[in-house]
Image (cartoon, helix red, strand yellow):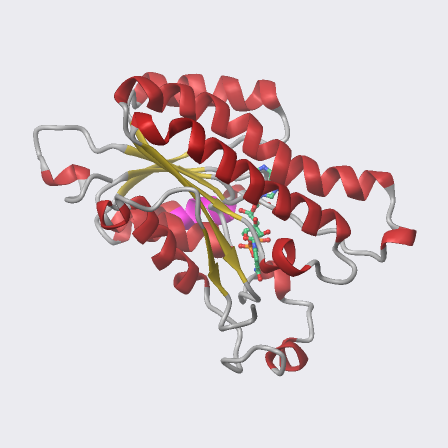
Amino acid sequence: MTGQPPSSDSRAAPALALVTGASRGIGRAIALELAAQGLHVAVNYKSNQEAAQQTLAQIEERGGRGELCPFDVTDEAAVNTALDALFARHPRIAVLVNNAGIVADNLFAMMSSQDWRRVTDTSLGGFFNVTKPVIKKMIPHKQGSVVTISSVSGLIGNRGQANYAAAKAGLMGATRALASEVARIGIRVNAVAPGVIQTDMTKDLPLDVLKKIIPMGRCGLPEEVARVVRFLCSDDASYVTGQIISVNGGMV
Ligand code: NDP
């Protein structure tokens, strides 16, 4: 996004925003928010096509534009194939939101190597697999914004989440390093670290108990994360890069 939403110029095709894991939860809210800014949103998901269709339908009901873009962020070859096809249709990518993520919680002593790898491959491996081809596409245009969804867990290290905390903390380091590499080119790279947000990921957690440790006394909504992502993608954040923005009701 460049100040005014790209689609405000009716002669130009709208710029592209790719949101990974946009079929549900926080990713869906981000997709809706970015589409409302005039971006053409590629709605990525892994397997839940029905939910992804609902995201796209909601975008279109609100007058926005987008398309489905399924791939597994852990599969580098599949990512490259899907992105080659996407970039052939939409040569200018303005925004990438790395949102896809999973949890597989367990105490570290009990954690399987498979659960360690599944979680780190999705968040951290997904960041590499998706961001690399996108950044290479942004560099010639000397413009773009990358926002990655980290977590409060990466800041404080939640009990039972060594895999997830490692992945999410790794994303913060990758964000800062990449931001410093591409800042002079005009590409901004930031991360958002949500606290406890009401989505499928948290639906089995004891939210009433968790609320007691959140200073604001409530869980967050996906839309509250999405509005911060929208800000970071906009020209209102033109001098913001390499930052980790917490959206957590005051937890840390
Ligand atoms: P959900 O479980 O509600 O949704 C996860 C999304 O990620 C789905 O769209 C899912 O697709 C997609 N996804 C999962 N694995 C892959 C993969 N390998 N390739 C492509 N897409 C994939 O999660 P949330 O909305 O709660 O979380 C979104 C992000 O926010 C995650 O990174 C999470 O770690 C982070 N976060 C969430 C918090 C919370 O409290 N909810 C707090 C802090 C951070 P499909 O529908 O096809 O399965």
The quadrant in which the C terminus is found is: bottom right
**Residue depicted at x 55% and y 50%:** 150
User: Position of 93 compared to 169: left or right?
Assistant: left
Percent of width and height locating residue 238: 26, 44
Location of residue 113 with respect to 250 vertically, above or below: above
Q: Is residue 51 part of the magenta span, yes or no? A: yes
Location of residue 112 with respect to 186 vertically, above or below: below
Percent of width and height locating residue 74: 63, 30
Residue 9 visible, this orientation = yes
Give the residues in magenta. Answer: 50-55
- Please identify the quarter of the rendering in which residue 48 is found: top right
* Secondary structure, magenta segment, majority class: helix
Percent of width and height locating residue 85: 41, 18
- Please identify the quarter of the rendering in which residue 199 is found: bottom right
Residue at the farthest right position: 109
User: Position of 45 compared to 14: left or right?
Assistant: right
Q: Is residue 164 part of the magenta span, yes or no? A: no
Residue 58 visible, this orientation = no
User: Position of 53 compared to 58: left or right?
Assistant: right
Q: Nearer the viewer, residue 179 or 2?
A: 179
**Residue depicted at x 23% and y 50%:** 236
Location of residue 244 with respect to 196 vertically, above or below: above
Percent of width and height locating residue 215: 53, 80
**Residue depicted at x 69% and y 75%:** 206
- Please identify the quarter of the rendering in which residue 241 is found: top left
